[in-house]
Every structure is written in structure tokens, then in C-alpha cells.
Amino acid sequence: MIKDRLYLFDTTLRDGQQTQGVDFSATDKAKIALALDGLGIDYVEGGWPGANPTDIDFFATCPALGTSTFTAFGMTKRSGRSAANDDVLAEVINAGTSAVCLVGKSHDFHVKTALNIPLEENLTNLRESFQHLKSLGREALYDAEHFFDGYKSNPNYTLSVLDAAMEGGVRWLVLCDTNGGTLPGEIAEITRIVADRFGGQNIGIHTHNDTETAVAGSLAAVDAGARQIQGTLNGLGERCGNANLVSIIPTLLLKPAFRDRFEIGVSEDKLTLLTQTSHMLDELLNRQPNRHAAYVGAAAFAHKAGLHASAILKDPTTYEHVPPETVGNARIVPMSNQAGRSNLLRRLSEAGIEATKDDPRLGQLLAEVKEKEDQGFSYDSAEASFQILARQALNQRRKFFDVERFRVTVERRFNAVNELTTVSEAVVVLNVDGERFISASESIDPTSNADQGPVNALWRAMKKDLGKYQDAIEGMELVDFKVRILTGGTEAITRVLIESRDRDGRRWSTVGVSANIVDASFQALIDSIDYKLTRDA
């Protein structure tokens, strides 16, 4: 049976940026784009070139994508100028992407009130914008803003908007439920009419989640003939978010109703990266992953003690609609030591740590992991710290150095040019094979003369002199530092996640937890150096 091709279009780098509290850096965007490319997403929309400094930097330094079509977003030309002479449209085109997605009005109300132009003039602007893109050899997509509300208000005009875009040479007509208020049944009904008119191979769907039906609406549109789905990782987006591709992708790949009829660019092998990719985004945003998220949440395949747990051990399919490993997740049966051991053995094997299933120390390690996670440690996002903990429990840890003590002071003062500044000083005393090393450092960057804080002072002091291991940590640097307050009040517990990198480009993450943020940071720093030495040894 020949399957229809469905195309996935990710808008995380623009729509996700509209989420309250989300502010991507250009580096964040590059990391997300590469992760999407690694999954096999067909289109990765980078944002609006020239709209803000972050997008300017990102489009100037965007990484090369191997699978995904990198796409720029903008708007159709404005009235009173030609498409070739519209400076806003020119910035989008000058980004040099092979595909360009332009948003334009499709609801007559917005044409009259927001644009304040005649309805026919809007059609001309659309047609000429896409003709210009086609003349430049670009693949053109049209995001028909407020399409469903526009269709319900004036179907003839809304369809004429799509006609104009097609006449201009557009490849995709994307039907947008911009305010998220159209229910799946309505989306299916209207999409079917549009697909019959233009052919489903030209139709895309873009839904918002204001009625908690964005995923259902996207799938309904596919059933009705649409062949492109736009959405975001973890459903990020303004207000209540956009259609969640993390839920849509496995549904398309694993559910017979879609799997038997369609194929997508994400393979079943790549699907195992889904949980990792979802959690990577949350870590970038310094957010706790949603434990109850479909497919990828920590509780998505968790079975509490009792009837469910007994049944799940005999037949995993009893209470699981898909095998957890297909999406890179894992089954959790909290009351089952054997289930816990199975997951633990898998993680140890992946880390290259030897252990047998009947090793009595596994039970102790499992209990210690659970106890520490109750205290606030997060080993899912700090694999290096987990490996150190595991090697310690299994008597496989080599001791490279001991920390006798450390001290950090923070002083606020006026500098030589009478500017108020804050300076941190750190002293670390280490013992390496019986030899004592005392190192000190300030937090002032010698290049920029800027204060970089107490954790940076600690790191500078620690890496100054590690005796015979000094060469092993040369070129090692800290590339990310995240702090999360786990409990409120004056006795707040703090979790610190540190990402490190060596001169070979290898990265690893470590974690520390304490009521004292400097102490939590120091724990993570020690683990980071320990992991580097263990791996290289």
C-alpha cells in the first residue's frame, strides 16, 4: 500500500519565543534547530530575520541542517510599494533560506480594520508577494491568519485569498486557527472543503491550544486532507500554546489509524530521541519537565503499586498504549524493586559501568538514587553526576583528589575609577595523593574587567593547580549554569546544574543540591572535574 507523505513544520524558534517567560538566545536557537534536524523534522522555521537582535544573530550564524529545510518567516508586502521594493520583505528574503513562510490576512474583518485597505488590494498584495518569491526560486508558504474565523464569517472571500496565493505560486496554504477557538469537528469540515478545492498536497494546518484541542484539531485536519502540520516542541506558544509536535509525532508513527496511511520524515529509530529532545528544551528554559506529558513525561509510563503494577509486570501492554522505549522513555513501577533494577542496569550499561542483575549493591544504589532525588537531585539531566554516584556505590570509583576546604567571600566596593562593583574571591584547598595545593582567584575577568560571580571565582581557583592531573583539565570550561529553587521561604533548597565542555567539544552535565547556592555549585564543579578525569583515565 502506498502511503501519503505528511510534512512536519516546526515553529518553536518563533512561536515558542512568544511564550510568556521564554527568551531564547541565538545559541539556544541553534541547539534547538540541530535537535529538530536530528529528529527528522521537514521544516525548521528560524524566526523573523531582522525583527530583533537575537534573530539577526541567529540567521547570521545559523548551523547547517542536514535533513530539515531551514525557513524564514515574515509578512506579505505592504500596500503602496512593490514586492521587490518592500524593505521588510527584503530582510526576510535576504536571509537566504530556501523556503520562506509569509503570514497574511484572510479574514475580511482584519483586512478592513487592521490593514484598513480594500479587500481586493489585500488579494493583490498576496499574489504579488508570492510571485516575487517564486521568481527568486524560493519555496513559498502562506500562513493564512485567522483562516477559520474568516471562513465562518465570509467563506467566499477567504477562499479567494487562497486563490490569490496559489496564483502567486505558493507551495503550501496553511490554515491557521489563530485564536485557538475552532473545535476539531469544525476544523475537519472546513479543511475538507479547502482540500477538495486545492488538493490536500497543498494544505497545512496551524492550531493554537486555547481550547486544549490543538493536537486533536491538527489530526482532524490530516483526516480531512491536510498534508502539513505546524507545531512546536512541548506545545510552546503564546497564551495557551501551539499544537504539540511531541504528542503529534508518535501518534502519527505508532497509531494504526495514521501509521497505516501516512509516512513522515521522523523514523522509528529517531523517535527514540523524542523524550531526550523534549527534556533538552525544558532544561534550556530552566523549567521542570511536565511529569504528566503524553509519551515523554516521567509519569507517562509510571504504574503505582496495586492491581495495575501486578498486571504490568505480567503483561506490559495491559496499561500502556505504546511501549515506552519507542519514544525514549522508560517504565516506572515505584513499588517494584525488580523494575527499578531493570532501568538501573540499562543506564549503567549505557554508561559503560559493569554490573550484574544479582549484585546486592544495586539495591543500595537504587535506594540512594531515590533518596537523593527526594532531596532535589535530578540525575536525568545530570548523567555525569549519576555515573559518579554509581561508581561509588559499586566500588568502581577512582579517587583523584580530596577537597579539604573552600572559602568564598563577596565584597562590594568602589573600584579604581570610583565605580561601585562587586568582587568575589575564592580559596580552595585540595589534596592530591598526599600533596596539598592551595589556590585562590578573583571573579574579575581579566579581558573584560567584569565581575563573573562567586561560582566563576571557585572554578578559576579549582582549575589553577590540580597537581599531576592539571594537564587533563586544561581546555575544560563551563558553558552553562542553571539554578532552580526547589522550596520557597528563607530555608530554600537550591539545585544547580552545570554543563561543561572539553577541548574536544564533548559536553557533560553535573548537579548539586544545598540550602547554600555556592555549596550546591561547588558539588557540581567537583563532579564535573571528577567525571572528566574518570572518563579520560
Image (spheres, rainbow, N blue to C red):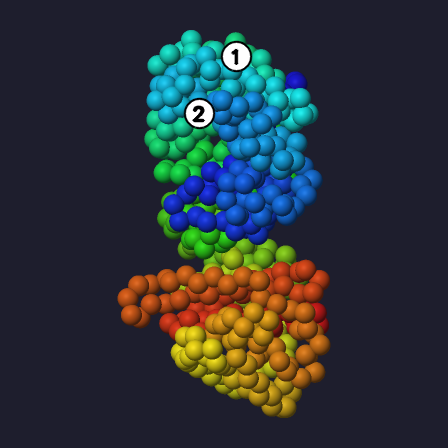
Q: Which residue is mark 2?
A: 145
Spot occupied by residue 371 in the image (x, y as percentages of width and height): 42, 66
Query: Cβ–Cβ below 8 Å for labels 1 and 2?
Result: no
In the picture, residue 259 is in which quadrant? Answer: top right
The part of the image, by quadrant, that contains residue 447 is: bottom right
Q: Residue at x 61, y 19 (%)?
A: 131
At numbered mark 2, what does the secondary structure look like: helix, strand or loop?
A: strand
Residue 509, placed above or below residue 170: below
> Of 420 and 152, which appears nearest the observer?
420
Q: What residue is drawn where x is 58% and y is 66%? A: 478
In the image, 406: left or right of 439? left
The residue at the point 55 percent across, 17 percent down is 127
- The front one of 84 and 439 is 84
Residue underneath mark 1 = 163
How many marks the image carries: the answer is 2
| Residue type at tag 1 | Asp
Going by the picture, which residue comes out furthest to the left? 489
Name the residue type under label 2: Glu
Assign the N terminus to one quadrant of the image: top right
Report whether 264 appears left or right of 407.
right
